[in-house]
Amino acid sequence: MAKSTLAFTCMNCNASHKKWVGRCDTCGEWNSIKEEAPLAAGPKGKTLGASKGRKLALGDLNTVDAPLERSTIGIDEFDRVLGGGLVPASAILVAGDPGIGKSTLLLQAAAEFARTGKKVIYISGEEASSQIRMRAQRLKLTDASVKLATETNLRDILTTLEEEAPDLAIIDSIQTMWADHVDSAPGSVSQVRATAHELTTFAKRKGVAIVLVGHVTKDGQIAGPRVVEHMVDTVLYFEGERGHQFRILRAVKNRFGPSDEIGVFEMTGCGLAQVTNPSELFLSERDIQTAGSVVFAGIEGTRPLLVEIQALVAPSPLATPRRTVVGWDTARLSMVLAVLEARCGISFAGKDVYLNIAGGLRISEPAADLAVAAALISARQDIPIASDTVIFGEISLSGALRPISQAENRLKEAQKLGFSAAFTPSRMKLSSESGMNVTKYDAVDAFVEHHFGSINEE
């Protein structure tokens, strides 16, 4: 006789039993023993290899699907990052440093979404309900019909969501959730993986949009197994410097929209306020005609963004000079310094170099190379760049300036903010230059010679 592969599990304490009994020996609960098939078993106790499953419905590549039905949250910057709004049955992971404002942002988003007539449930495993209500009072959100609960047991959370059937559920945070069928502590790899899988599966099955809050490590990566980022549809990072009031919501993965879009917020006493024109805000405190200060016209996602790049070059008393960078890639700075020395004859040996992106923004575009080089030389020679000028261009190892994408959008944004001149690479096709005085260069040495003349080594 074949051995039975069925298991008997207590629904109250998850204890396993060899056979069905009326009362659980572990917790003492009556009529809580249920018969369950293990995950590796198929119909009638057969293994997966010994039984057939149902045939899948196959479709063609030219099959026309119904368009996505998005629901706007009510916060334009949040909707922009999501690709135009919230998609039902989607799973979103939001991560950021402790205290950066994740809970504040999501509570505001929950309130705005509830005000549109949608049903929203906010479940916290980190804060008490009284703490969340105090934050809601401070942010003046108490009029929104957001349902609130504090719980860490995944089974209770899923039961509540299934019975309430909300349009949006926010789980804060995934590291505090506890699945009673996993034998490990909350926050462990197995717990995070299991709870994320159950919640994303529930979202797809019930058509509920779920937002999961995730912790980050000291390196800025999302804590827990990497597979969680593959499970969800969208991964958002909420970043910013504690000393600055600006916060950036950045999409690093999005199955329903651009994967490099950003939303800009300003931290105020009444919560996070949207910044509709971040370029103007990032340049609001820029000094006039300051050596080492250059405006870079960049692109973040689909949005042109103008930021100030600041450089300081000073004699170093150390045998190995400092190379300090805030908001840019340190390796990229080393490459630009090497190109300036090898192709332009400008040495930074014996000098400390400090580079900063104003406003707490982080830039990853290679198009910032020329602006960084201009700021470094301007600071070294104490020669300012004209304040009405923007600069962008990628520098190759040969010293040539490479063309970049979306040059016209960069110029239009600069012209809108009052800039009248631009320094760019040549070989770029510009159908319209927005009425600006655009000067093009083939190589970085030509740019240096034109603006700074012959630089004599000290």
Image (cartoon, rainbow, N blue to C red):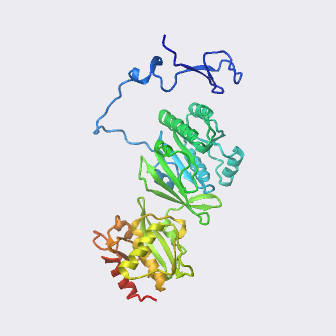
Residue 21 point in image, percent of width and height: 65, 15
Q: Please tell me which residue lies in front, 413 or 41.
A: 41
In the image, what residue occupies the spot 59% across and 48% down? Answer: 111
Residue 10 point in image, percent of width and height: 63, 23
Picture quadrant of residue 406: bottom left
Residue 245 point in image, percent of width and height: 59, 64
Tell me: residue 98, above or below residue 24. below
Picture quadrant of residue 419: bottom left
Q: Is 49 on the left-hand or right-hand side of 177?
A: left
Residue 354 visible = yes
Q: Please tell me which residue lies in front, 185 or 392.
A: 185
Residue 186 point in image, percent of width and height: 63, 40
Tell me: residue 382, above or below residue 196. below
Name, please, the residue furthest toward the front: 319
Name, please, the residue furthest toward the top: 1
- Count the marks: how many? 0
Q: Please tell me which residue lies in front, 20 or 448.
A: 20
In the image, what residue occupies the spot 64% across and 47% down? Answer: 143
In the image, what residue occupies the spot 44% across and 56% down? Answer: 261
Residue 391 visible = no
Q: Is 291 on the left-hand or right-hand side of 9?
A: left
